[in-house]
Amino acid sequence: MNVLKYLNVKPEPTDTGTDLRAGLFSRAEEARSRGNFIASALLFERIAEMESSPASALHQSARMYIEATDFTRAEQLLLRVAQAEPHNAEVYLDLAQLSFHQGRLDEAEFFYERALALRPEWHEAKEGLLHVGETRTEQLRRERLARKETALSFAQYEEKENLLSSQDKRVDPSLFKKGWNELHHDHGPAFVLTHNGNNAKTEWGDGATLRGIEALRGYLVSDVPMASLRIYMDGDVIYDAPLIEAPQRFERSNPNIRKWAYNAWIDFTNFPRGWHEFIFCAFGADGEAHEGRTWRREHMIVADPLPAGFATESDTVVPPFEPGTPGSLVEQINARPSIVHKASPHSFPGKIDTVAVLRSDQLGDTAVSAAAFLHLRQILPDARLVGLMSAASAELSRSYGVFDEIIELDFPEDQAQRQRVMDFDVQEALIDRLKPYKFDVAIDFVVNGTSKRLVAMTGAPVTMGFGNDDSKTFAMDIVTNDPLSNNDITHHSVRMMMLVKSLELWMKSDTRIVRREDLRREDLAAFGIAPNERYVLIHSGSRITFTRWQHYVALAKQVIAELGVKVVFMADDDSVRDQFAEEEEAGRLIYLARKLPFDQFDALISFASVFVGNDSGPKHLAALRGAPVVSLHSSRISWIEWGQEQTGVVISRQVPCAGCGLHHDPEECAQDVACMKYIRLSEVFREVRALFEAGTSDDQVVAAIELA
């Protein structure tokens, strides 16, 4: 429901004051009945402004603010009413209940007694006063327990301190295992935003930016059950869905505290570009929103989707859908096939045809960058390199014969300001001049200074440079310290070359297959595997349990049935062993749920015809040894970062919330871990079959080595 529609009451030329007040009152009551308490409160305040005795309308407004849990505003209005009507017992009861709810027992007691003085037999006020006394008793009990626990903690702390006093001071107490009291604390109501776009510098400004199909993620902390979340954009509802209940771990004393998570997948492709106002509104199980605790107002930018062909390997970049595609956005995304990525040492996210090279400082800076510039040309022989240079370095840059074009910057040093400056008109002219180049990459070679402000003006989707700067795609921090002076002890030219070398490795890493010559196939006889026997190894375990794929048992059975090959099934325990009784008895499956000596473990992995597993340590070992790998990746982290580079394939899914980084609190996903759930058995088996039929693991190792 649009909150603003209730407030849009304008007097017509023929309206009388009475008619307008009646219209406002009608809208206030309608807003109240629909649970839109903030709108109702604001309308009652407008009614109060029209009346000579506004106390009644202000009292109604205060009660609406209480319903919306904006307790600060409610208390302000109630005190105004109490001042105007000192004999109004109901306003004192409201003040008492409000104070009690906020834990201010002395004030609650005062207002309850004031209400009883005006209405001595008022049962509700008597009950409230009794509840204040009971709460004080409980608080005293808790305080005594807390003092006891604190004393125990202090004694433990003293014991640790005494131990440390006789030990090497390099020992770090922060690494000690913490006790229950140190880990747990009381959580108050909160609305936590975990992802609202990425910060970017755009033509509309610098801020959280949404592009194409995005995920808005977060959770509420509340001891009141939450039911659903509604997201408004400029007053219109763009998302309405249930919240997902999750535990609030490490809560100290309130057993009712919970998290209520959301993961809103929204397509912003056709939304107007520029700044927009977003309101995140959570509703309780009673259908009511609680302002101040369950409302958030944010401003974000909607920008164009990423350029075609850029970051297509990223699981976060969800391709648009054809108009008229059936189903909700969530259903459409989950219905798409998984993505199969060929293992590769290449990880740069797009093409490199045109590069902006910024060196906007002094002649000496450009001189010590010569080796880096020459190497940049060496690794990008066919790219168009455009130098954006200061007046002091333009001619030297031309002399290198590296750049296809030099643009001399109007970027002088201002002595009074002690930095380089560029006027508004000059900046706009530079932006317009650079736009036609359609840069793929911009590299800023200046370590410190205002040059980094120019990077966004290039319009390049990939930006590189120094410093911990969120606006850069690739940011480096290189710090070396003289042990006495803290001065740098690395040549400046080394920093420049490291930046170019980083791009070179980004384009193609130096990974390789490393085999062990001391491992022999004959050693597999201990597991019932003949020296020349081919087998598929399935490693079903994962340290992060919620990222485990759910179809390993079915995959093993299908491999045995359709490929006619033995399966080695590695598991954390025997929980699924009984599902393989027939296969084990027939000698077609080897079930291993124990820790093996490393050499045996290494041999089983190294000689596998195909290895299948989650993104885990054994997967990386299999790739290192050259075994063909089918790796199943959740999108919690980038497959590009942790996918194997040597052999096989990585299977993942494109979802808007990719990169969530969830580890200990999977319930915050709020999309049922769709990035693993919808990797289908048929998709995985297809890749296993293809690798198995392509040849032996030894054949593939030789091919991979030759390719490298």
Image (cartoon, grey):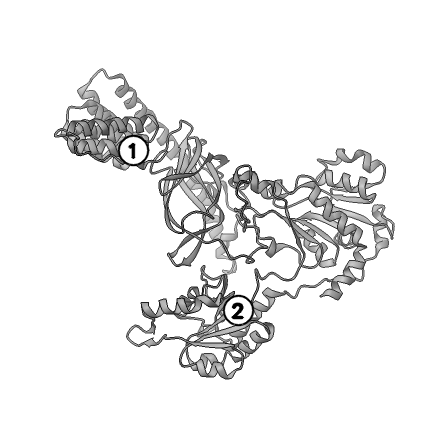
Rendering coords of residue 90 (x, y %)? 22, 23
Residue 509 vs 651, above or below: the answer is: below
Image quarter hosting the N terminus: top left
Q: Secondary structure at mark 1?
A: helix
- Local packing at callout 1 (Cα closer than 10 Å; few below 14, some 14-19, many 20+) is many
Image quarter hosting the C terminus: bottom right
Marks 1 and 2 sit apart, C-alpha to C-alpha, by 53 Å
Looking at the rendered structure, the number of numbered marks drawn on it comes to: 2
Rendering coords of residue 402 (x, y %)? 54, 79
Disc 2 target residue: 354
> Mark 1 or 2 closer to N-term?
1
Q: Does residue 33 appear in this view?
A: yes
Rendering coords of residue 419 (x, y %)? 34, 73
Residue 429 position by quadrant: bottom left
Q: Amino acid at mark 1?
A: Tyr
Name the residue: 81% across, 54% down. Answer: 695
- Local packing at callout 2 (Cα closer than 10 Å; few below 14, some 14-19, many 20+) is some
Name the residue: 24% across, 31% down. Answer: 61
Disc 1 target residue: 6
Rendering coords of residue 106 (x, y %)? 26, 31
Left or right: residue 548 compared with residue 3: right
Residue farthest toward the left in the current orientation of the protein: 52
Marks 1 and 2: CB-CB under 8 Å?
no
Near-viewer residue (388 or 476): 388
Name the residue: 43% across, 64% down. Answer: 456
Residue farthest toward the top in the current orientation of the protein: 121
Q: Amino acid at mark 2?
A: Thr
Left or right: residue 87 compared with residue 320: left
Left or right: residue 559 compared with residue 306: right
Near-viewer residue (485 or 456): 456
Q: Does residue 110 appear in this view?
A: no
Residue 44 marker: none
